Amino acid sequence: MKAQPKASHYINGRYVDDEQGRPLEVIYPATGEAIARLHAATPNIVELAVEAARAAQDEWARVRPAERGRILRRAADILRARNDELARLETLDTGKPVQETEVADPASAAEALEFFGGAVAAFHGDYVDFGGGPFAYTRREPLGVCVGIGAWNYPIQGAGWKSAPALAMGNAMVFKPSENTPLSALALAEIYTEAGLPDGLFNVVQGLSEVGAALVTHPEVAKVSLTGSVPTGRKVLAEAGARMKHATMELGGKSPLIVFDDADVENAVGGAMLANFYSTGQVCSNGTRVFVQEGIYDRFLARLTERTAKIRIGDPLDPATQMGPLINRAQLDKVTGYIAIGREEGARLHHGGGVPHLQGFEGGFFIEPTIFTGVRDDMRIAREEIFGPVMSVLTFREEGEAIERANDTEFGLSAGVFTLNLPRAHRVIAELKAGSCWINHYNLAPVELPFGGFRQSGVGRENSLAALAHYSQLKSVYVETGDVDSPY
Ligand code: NAD
């Protein structure tokens, strides 16, 4: 299997490479085989990319927003037309099954391009009347060169979610994908060029943390949008803050999902599985602490176990496969390490927990979907982000207790509630300290809704008009229509 791109980086509308850069091997997580070899960006490549973005941005900012949007929507059409081919590339890059990538990844990027391509023409400043003549207006102006830094779990979606509002608003972007999944952002860059985006506005450079850090600290860069872990977020936000740069941080979580006695059991089980097993559990918003009220616990656990046992793990390119491998060996070691910690801490390993033996995929990083019961709030598996398919089931008696325990975390990305009691649903959600919440569903992220976290889970929002605000700055303009009343 090979997925070698033409070169490592995409700058100023074309592929470039610098073989002096540290070698980057791209591994297909299902087999462990190398599918591409790239080079991390050298300082020279970083400079070329930022300079290309800087040079192109000024003119782009003067293009009518509706015309900028038209180019984005053309790129969305190409993404949709090439959906299956891009989904396959995403599967090779991430190991996620094509059953997911064909519906979730390029399609979500396309949705962002369509939404921001349309919304930007209606996103303007305000008019303020001061009565009797003077007035003011505000202008939404682009920031300049923005940097996007991606995580490995949703590579093309992340590139689309960051570049679409940035470009729609008149900025240029330099995007650094995760070193684990460098391929699909290059495909998106090619598509932007094909759609007519002027050269230099969307550039892709590869590399690890030092390349990310070089971009964040570059004096020509006005904003950074990172998707990653909390420790990385702290470092990047500190560097950006020290230079007074704008920043959006989409970080990790340990989100609660509360299932009340009156919930529809099948829906609650389906929601809990979506909240833990999609993308092999490598989803930032996952509801990994499942609080189940005592009266429904037995029925919930029985159906959860039956349905989890039927999950098909295996070849990600087989359309029947429902769960692929984790991203790499380090993540597999981390997840199996947490499973061992959970057992040592006294939680009951109720289901899974093992490494499956799959013929032909012996070199892959597979792990069974795993359910722990008897989990206490103070256990590490209930406090720390695992980023794998490991669900902790906890029980509770009453509403106030569930809210208090759900909020007892440093994170605040997401939360979910399953109940058929309408007032309770809204009452509980209002109390939960999380940015992206669901009632009677889990993990949907439509582009119309702001996405992002409270507390340690982040700063700023992606998607919705909020993202356009985060990729722009406001200018206030006071206009006098009479004389200047000056005391001098
Ligand atoms: P990570 O923090 O290791 O890396 C994220 C990105 O930051 C990578 O591209 C990496 O190269 C780069 N990076 C690392 N150190 C840097 C530095 N000092 N300066 C600049 N860039 C640096 O995260 P990951 O392991 O790729 O992804 C998993 C994490 O991302 C999880 O914690 C997950 O919850 C989180 N995540 C959050 C969201 C969200 O939207 N909130 C979505 C997906 C993943």
Image (tube, grey):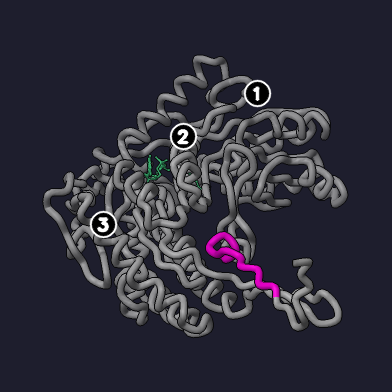
**Circle number at residue 328:** none
Q: Is mark 2 within 8 Å of ligand 1?
A: yes
Is 476 a magenta residue? yes
Q: Quadrant of residue 128?
A: bottom right
* Residue 114, image x, y percentages: 52, 75
Q: Is residue 444 left or right of residue 2?
A: right
Q: Please tell me whether mark 2 sits on a helix, a strand or a loop.
A: helix
The quarter of the image that holds ligand 1 is top left
Q: Give, as a single range, the part of the protein colored magenta.
A: 468-478
**Circle number at residue 377:** 1
**Circle number at residue 231:** 2
Q: Residues within 10 Å of mark 2 (few under 14, many from 20)?
A: few
Magenta segment, prevailing SS (helix, strand or loop)? strand
**Circle number at residue 47:** 3
In this rendered view, identify the residue nearer to me: 85 or 234.
234
* Residue drawn at (33%, 57%) of the image: 317
Q: Amino acid at mark 3?
A: Glu
* Residue 380, image x, y percentages: 54, 22
Q: Where 334 sits versus 134, above or below? A: above
In this rendered view, identify the residue nearer to me: 48 or 445.
48
Dot 1 or dot 2: first in sequence order is 2
Q: Is residue 416 visible?
A: yes
* Residue 122, image x, y percentages: 63, 78
Q: Amino acid at mark 2?
A: Pro
Q: Quadrant of residue 473?
A: bottom right
Q: Quadrant of residue 365?
A: top left
